[in-house]
Image: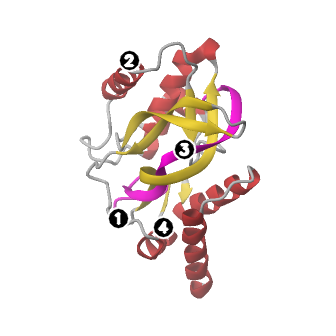
Amino acid sequence: MLNRDAICSGAYLESFNFLPPDILWTQAQIDQSLAETMAKRPAGEDVWVFAYGSLIWNPLSSYDERVAATLHGWHRSFCIRLVAGRGTPQRPGRMLALEPGGSAQGVALRLAAASLEDELRILWIREMVTGAYTPTWTTVTLATGETKPALAFVANGCRQYESDSSPSAIAHVIAAAQGALGSNAEYVFRLKQALADCALADAYVEEVARAIARLQTNQA
């Protein structure tokens, strides 16, 4: 599993060192993306991040508050071709992102104010290693009923983008993919469980997980 030490030391790059250099973002590109995003930060607001995938169970960045939340106007989609981490160029998997429309339940994390610069840098290195996302300021509705501006990492139509992310199209791809960080199927099952642990659910994730489980049963 990816950890904070690997991010801070640069050891995480070992999982990506076989990628073409034009796919892997440089630290300068990551830093520029962070600066441009933070220049648009709503004035006077804490920095919240909407966690909808592995950030739910493995956030790495330190936070002061964690609350179940709903993001309206976006939905989960395994729409990014995954060629590192839990996949390879020879046997790519699918990475989770957000696409426009619908809604998504997840967790809102209020980053620790005392170390905000460091926490954001760790977050950006983790999420923007290939520039497959666009960091976007959105509005989430907390379980308390409050609304907060929050960062969400959404799909950006990069060259790894795949237009068909339907369960029937991706289940066999995810079931077969594995990389340095583990199997792609494990990620889906972990996501399903992490949502359940928060008393949340996502019908799309549930359907993808069922399809993968059926494939695994048939292959046993």
Circle nearer the viewer, 2 or 1: 2
| Earlier sequence position, callout 2 versus callout 1 | 2
Identify the residue under disc 3: 71
> Closer to the observer: label 4 or label 1?
4
Residue 22 position, x and y percent, is 24, 41
Which residue is at 55% across, 51% downward? Answer: 104
Q: Could you tell me residue 44's position as x and y percent?
A: 53, 13
Q: Name the residue that disc number 1 marks.
A: 90
Looking at the rendered structure, the secondary structure element under dot 2 is: loop
In the image, residue 137 above or below residue 216: above
Quarter-of-image position of residue 196: bottom right
For the residues bearing labels 2 and 4, Cβ distance under 8 angstroms: no
Q: Main secondary structure of the magenta part?
A: strand
- Give the mark, 3 or 2, whose residue is nearer the N terminus: 2
- On residue 122, which mark appears? none
Name the residue tied to disc 4. 174
Q: How much space separates mark 2 and mark 1, taking CA atoms? A: 39 Å
Q: Nearer the viewer, residue 86 or 174?
A: 174
Magenta span of residues: 61-89
Where the C terminus falls, by quadrant?
bottom right
Check whether the beta carbons of the residues at disc 4 and disc 3 lie within 8 A of each other.
Answer: no
Whole-number angstrom distance, CA of label 3 to CA of label 2:
22 Å
Who comes first in sequence, dot 2 or dot 4?
2
Identify the image quadrant of residue 29: top left
Q: Which marked residue is nearer to the observer: mark 2 or mark 4?
A: 2
Q: Which residue type carries mark 2?
A: Ala
Q: Amino acid at mark 4?
A: Ile
> Residue 39 has which mark?
2
**Residue type of the residue flagged with mark 3:** Leu
Q: Is residue 145 magenta?
A: no
Q: Secondary structure at mark 1?
A: loop
